[in-house]
Amino acid sequence: MKATLIVGSARKEGSTEIQCEALADALGEEGFDVSVIRPYDMDIRHCTGCNRCFTEGKCHIKDDMHVIYDAVRDADLIVLGTPVYFSGPSSIIKQVIDRFQLYWHTEDDDPPKKYVALVSTGGSRNPRFENVTSICRAFAFSINAKWGGESLVENTDGEDISPAGKEAYRFGKALALKIKGQI
């Protein structure tokens, strides 16, 4: 089984990166072939809303997004990792999600075969995870995937961000079992 983690944070040693690394470890231990994509380090442009994807069946923008499209197409599990910024996902992950506009117009009557999950951290004691979760669930729906769940960790602006990794590792183990049909 293949898993693709899309890290929507620019902080290389931040809590979202820690979550994604721990989740990758858990999935790898469960036999998943895990790839990690960091859009922050890529040339990903904004969706222009030109609607050419409706008629052409693909995005016409020539950038690194093809790497993400290919990884999502080939994955059994896609995990979106994002901190909460202003009650929503980071602009990095949102830009990637927006570029999946072309999937909204694809007729796909097949039952979902893929899973999408979310790992997210919020610096405050009461972050607005519901907005982030809603957007990521919409992404899952748009690519005809099942919702695998979420790992949400609050209060990560402090010095000890290790709970983010511990929770993501636990979540990864449970998610792997769920996908493999063992629970």
Image: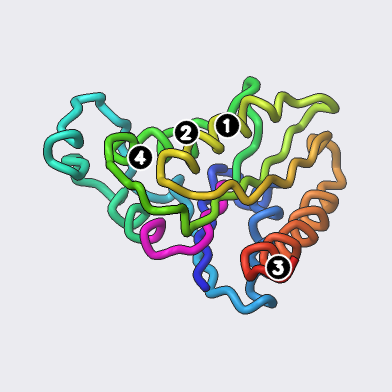
Q: Residue at x 33, y 59 (%)?
A: 70
| In-image side of 5 versus 183 (left or right) | left
Among numbered discs 1 and 3, the one appearing first in the sequence: 1
| In-image side of 82 versus 159 (left or right) | left
Residue behind mark 4: 100
**Numbered badge on residue 94:** 2
- Above/below status of 158 relative to 178: above
Percent position of residue 101, x then y: 32, 34
**Numbered badge on residue 89:** 1
Please identify the quarter of the rendering in which residue 131 is found.
top right
Q: Report, in whole angstroms, how far the alpha carbon at label 1 lies from the one at label 4.
A: 15 Å
Rate crowding at label 4 as few (under 14), some (14 to 19) or many (20 or more) other CA atoms within 10 Å.
many
Element on which disc 2 rests: helix
- Above/below status of 5 relative to 133: below
Q: Please report the bounds of the magenta region as a residue range.
A: 71-80
Q: Is disc 1 in contact with disc 2, using a CB cutoff of under 8 Å?
A: yes
Q: Is disc 3 in contact with disc 2, using a CB cutoff of under 8 Å?
A: no
Residue behind mark 3: 177
Among numbered discs 2 and 4, the one appearing first in the sequence: 2
